[in-house]
Image: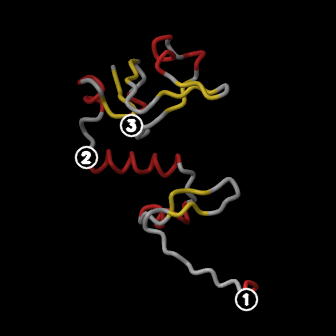
Amino acid sequence: MQAKSIRELEVHEPIAPAELVAQCERRGKQLFAPAGTVFDSPDCFQLVGLGVAVPHDDECAAMFADRTPEQIAATEHASRRLAAGIDPEDFARYDAGELLGYTAYGRDIPGPNAKVIPDTDEDDE
């Protein structure tokens, strides 16, 4: 069974086959498979179920034959939102493109549709 990743995924080297490890990029002690990596495993359908991959063969596609395209898109969207660490209170802002995520200090990373708030610091005058 095969699934193809739709975004970069962390790979756990001790359990990954050597041919998969060879495709990956190492950053420090972590190993990452690029988007588009094909995973060949009896369990790779789980990646599709999590919304981080799409079926790459008929066997994997059959596991999700009962899902509509809308359900698949919703799962992939929820996965992106989770990966970005979006607080549930900010889901609407993320979905509207106003928020991409947060900095290490918890400040918003504005999205393409962010509303610009003018700086009203009176101390600058």
Q: Residue at x 47, y 66 (%)?
A: 98
Disc 2 residue type (three-letter):
Pro
Residue 7, relative to residue 104: is it above or below?
above
Please state which of residues 85 and 113 is positioned toward the viewer in this rendering: 113
Q: Which residue is mark 3?
A: 6
Disc 1 residue type (three-letter):
Glu
Q: Which residue is mark 2?
A: 69
Secondary structure category for the residue under label 1? loop
Q: Are marks 3 and 2 in contact (CB under 8 Å)?
A: no
Residue 48, relative to residue 81: is it above or below?
above
Q: Which residue is mark 1?
A: 125
Please state which of residues 44 and 14 is positioned toward the viewer in this rendering: 14
* Residue 40 spot, x, y in % from top left: 38, 18
Quadrant of residue 29 within the rendered picture:
top right
> In the visual, does 88 lie left or right of 5?
right
Mark pair 1, 2: CA separation: 55 Å
Secondary structure category for the residue under label 2? helix
